[in-house]
Image (cartoon, helix red, strand yellow):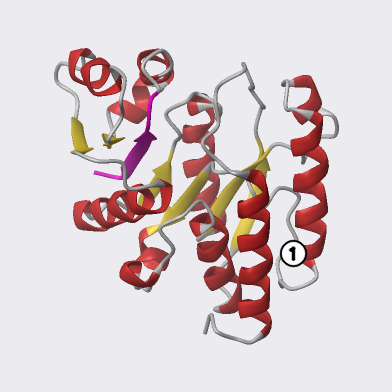
Amino acid sequence: MDYFIFIPAYNVEKELSPLLSRIPRTVWENARICVINDGSQDNTLLEAEVFEAPGLNYQIHTFSKNKGYGAVVKKGLQMGLESKAKYICCLHGDGQYPPESIPYFFEEMQKYSIDVLQGSRHLEKGSAKKGGMPLYKIIGGFFLTQIENLFFNTKLTDRHSGFLCYSHEFLKNLDLDQLSSSFDIDLEILAIADSRRFKIEERAIKTRYAGEYSNLNVWAYGLRVLHKLFKKHQKHYH
């Protein structure tokens, strides 16, 4: 098995099945795909269970209570490492990120020996606005990314995109238990990869916002991001 894809899913009963259906057949044939239900209070778990994937490597892991995005990501990364897959991808269950891009991302990682590949909603100018991203998120994300780029070796255009693919070689060096259990876990992993000189790159992805409810507290997240930058400055990521 070449790929492991985990799907954080919290209260996405309407979006989950369409998302799973959009994953390319070539990915299904070469991957284990796992929906991680984070204690959803709607019918997310039921939608995951009734999705038909005959003959495919599909599984469901569920938390009885909501543990938060970081806990889901750590579980997904742990399962990915245990699967021995060469590449592991996080695909959000709300359909915001394009599953159609997964084959291209894996091909690019293999072709260019990339350790962490992030999907960027801003690499193509105007893409985020065209995809319906709220203006405050465009401005806030741009502001934070510009500050963050001052601290990191690798300069990126969209450090807050959750569309991330990792190599097994990189992930096996992480101490998952020490990672954040909040939304800032993605930035934390990027910071670790950057400080240890793993190869980080980005590729453009299409943006899709359709009025989904977000569980992210923007202000609290921004403060946690600034705290991570302070830790980076103090060299706590080595």
Q: Is residue 4 magenta?
A: yes
**Helix, strand or loop for the magenta stretch, by majority:** strand
Give 187 or 201, whichever is nearer the viewer. Answer: 187
Total marks shown come to 1
Q: Which residue is mark 1?
A: 148
Residue name at image x 38 percent, y 66 percent: 169
Nearest the camera: 5 or 68? 68
Identified at 18% across, 19% down, the residue is: 49
Q: Is residue 237 above or below residue 66?
A: below
| Residue 176 location, quadrant | bottom left
Quadrant where the N terminus sits is top left
Q: Which structural element holds mark 1?
A: helix
Q: For residue 74, which quarter of the picture?
A: bottom left
In the image, residue 212 lies at what x, y percent?
56, 21
Q: Which residues are magenta?
A: 1-11
- Left or right, 162 with reference to 3: right
